[in-house]
Image (tube, helix red, strand yellow):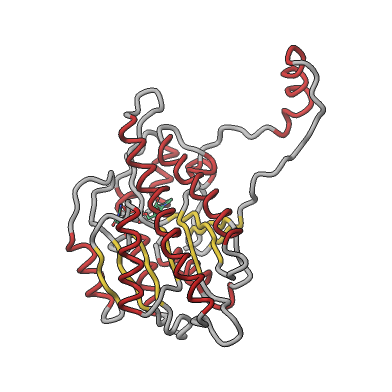
Amino acid sequence: MTGLLDGRAAIVTGAGRGIGRAIAEALVAEGASVIVADNGASISGEGGDPAVARETARALGERAVAFDESVASPGVAKHLVELAVKQFGGIDIVVNNAAILRDAFVFRADPRDWDAVLRNNLSAPFYLINAASAVMREQGKTGRGGSAGYDWGRIVNIVSSAGLYGNPGQAAYASAKAGLFGLTRVTAMDLARAQITANAVAPFARTRVTDIIQPANEAQKTYKERALRIGAHHVANLVTALCSPAAKGITGQLLGVRGREVFLFGQPRPVARLEAGPAATLAHELGARLSDKFTDLTTDLEAFNTEPLV
Ligand SMILES: NC(=O)c1ccc[n+]([C@@H]2O[C@H](COP(=O)([O-])OP(=O)(O)OC[C@H]3O[C@@H](n4cnc5c(N)ncnc54)[C@H](O)[C@@H]3O)[C@@H](O)[C@H]2O)c1
């Protein structure tokens, strides 16, 4: 390892296992100190197990500290940032990776599940960015980032292709991830002057979540077989790169990573325009003039069901 992140302090949520753990391992391997923030919940966000964060932190060594509370509240997010400042003298990197899943078709979903998913997957990243970025900006003024003014601070939000393409039964999850991308854009804008970057990464990797996929057809069976071959260390590699000094000019971007393949996603922008007539004719006009540019209902599982580069 190259000491790319020597002296940097990071918070990684959901770092007790899966992709978050791989990210924490990679950041520590490059010299960073890391708070392993993980409450040890089930995939659907129930229960908790403090041993999950503790065991990962222990395995990572003396530059890792365990934090086992749920990050889905503003008070806890503030407390987490205070812990980083107390333990490491500041905070340079925030990776919002923790997430839960409560899938149900939109016509059957329980609004309480919607609330829980939005709180964990979208509000929690906001709480942490809100608390951490205030400290990061102050650090800039006191020169923590280096001598020539502060040009350091990295926020990475782990999103999902489900939030870009959609997937049947994932209303809450996809909405939260799409929202997290919107939060990434505004964070990048609000922190641009402080030279703190914010990017979104859509990962693909084998974790306990891919392990429990129940294929409903041949295509899903193939998807699962392929997904099980993709290691989370590839995601960690991209996140580490985005956290490195050389990535200081990369902000507001939406990237994907699937094995050794890294994608830059386009961001929705108008692809066609017309001058509207009355409603009675507008739908015909939309169909006649723009339908070749309509986006079809391909799901993310269909779009990314190719042989992975591992
Ligand atoms: N695995 C994939 O292929 C894939 C695909 C798309 C997106 N993602 C995203 O990648 C991220 C990691 O997913 P994973 O597959 O490693 O999942 P995972 O369930 O294995 O890990 C998530 C971790 O987050 C923790 N967590 C959940 N809610 C928390 C909370 N409120 N406070 C603290 N910790 C909490 C859990 O205890 C768990 O250890 C998620 O954001 C997920 O949406 C994963």
Relative vertical location of residue 11 with respect to residue 185 in this rendering, above or below? below
User: Residue 135, how many percent across, how many down?
Assistant: 44, 69
| Quadrant, the N terminus | bottom left
| Residue sitting at the far top | 280
Residue 177 at what x, y percent from top left? 47, 46
At x 53%, y 76%, the residue is 140
- Residue at the limit of the structure toward the bottom, as seen here: 147
Q: Nearer the viewer, residue 128 or 95?
A: 128
Tell me which residue sits at (80%, 19%) in the image: 277
Residue 294, located in which quarter of the rendered image? top right
Identify whether 85 is placed above or below 106: below
Q: 270 left or right of 90?
A: right
Instruction: Name the residue nearer the viewer: 288 or 306.
Output: 288
In the foreground, 4 or 203: 4
- At 33% from the left and 69% from the top, the residue drawn is 82
Residue 241 at x, y percent in the picture: 52, 72
Give the image location of residue 64, x and y in percent.
29, 75
215 lies left or right of 305: left
Based on the displayed image, in which of its 4 quarters is residue 275 positioned? top right
Q: Is residue 163 above or below residue 63?
A: above
Q: Work out whether residue 123 or residue 225 is closer to the camera in this orientation and state it.
A: 123
